[in-house]
Amino acid sequence: MENISYGSHILTMQGLELSESTSYPVFFTLLFVYIALLITNIGVVVIIIAERSLHEPMYLLFCNLSVNDILGNTILMPRVLLDIVSKERFISYGACVTQAFFSHTYGSASHTILIIMAIDRYVAICNPLRYSAIMTAKAVVTLSVSAWAFSVVLVGVLLSLTIRLSRCRSHINHAFCDNASLFKLSCEDVSINNIYGLFYTVVLFSSSMGTVAVTYIRIAIICLTKKNAELNSKAIQTCASHLVLYLIMLLTGYIVIIMHRFPEHQFLRKLIAILFHVVPAHLNPIIYGLQTKQLRLKIWQIFSKKRIHS
């Protein structure tokens, strides 16, 4: 199969390699999680867009995170679910590159969107009187476009370096397509890919960790020095959900990177890579909806009205 496919555009996917007895339980579990994350994320976006009282920078910026979760998982999960129950796992090279692009863009945008959300929280708490003047509609759009553009450029360069390589293999040794799986199809020197991959990871993680650390340290200093109970309460309410989302995303990202160091645990590595997509995306709207008072009240009002009408 390998020798026949070297010059073709058809690749084979290894998938999760589950036994017959476990394939359907895993399939339905992931299907349920995928449907649940779609319902919660689409629901949050619709509520924020439809409700004028929620047309504030904090909620509009959060829409970026939900849209990212929807796009990232919709490109990935249907294919993963199909491969779980399918015996023949073929994918075109173009479709594989597309899946890898959206998979990496999802991970990168998760960082950049949470960066702009941290900046928003910093301005709201440290400069409350100037918040409306600073976080205008134009500023929200600029920050959102910048977050997506930065991610797309980083990932675009990453995959451009991989696409230029010739292929001598046709088997993707993973549950889905990513950059590492694609450049491993080549027998050429991939030193440039490894160097840029390291640069990409360092820039992304250092910029997000640095921004979040600086903004939250400044917020903590303001809260401690002013000793204002109302300010402290507002900071805890609005920052706790953002910080929890960031820590979940960061933890799952680190686990994925660490598992690449243990090739002997292939099934666990592939499963964790899938969970990196679905777990944060599933928890984001739940955590944000429960922790953010205004959004929580609006969701509660909607469900209360439905219960009265029924």
Image (cartoon, helix red, strand yellow):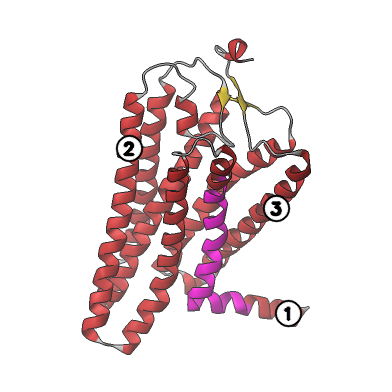
- CA distance separating discs 1 and 2: 52 Å
> For mark 2, what is the residue?
198
Q: Give the image location of residue 258, x and y in percent.
A: 43, 45
Callout 1: 10 Å neighbours few (<14), some, many (20+)?
few
- Could you say which disc has been placed on residue 223 in the image? none
In the image, residue 297 above or below residue 247: below
Q: Are marks 3 and 1 in contact (CB under 8 Å)?
A: no
Q: Residue 215: where, in percent of width, then height?
A: 27, 66
User: What is the CA distance from the residue labelled 3 to the residue labelled 2?
Assistant: 34 Å
Would you say 232 lies left or right of 54 here? left
Helix or strand or loop: what does disc 3 sit on?
Answer: helix
- Residue of label 3: 29
- Say which amino acid is labelled 1: Arg
> Which residue does the image show at 69% across and 50% down from the upper left?
31
Instruction: Residue type at mark 3: give it.
Output: Thr
Q: Magenta segment, which residues?
A: 274-301
Main SS of the magenta part reads: helix
- Say what secondary structure mark 2 lies in: helix
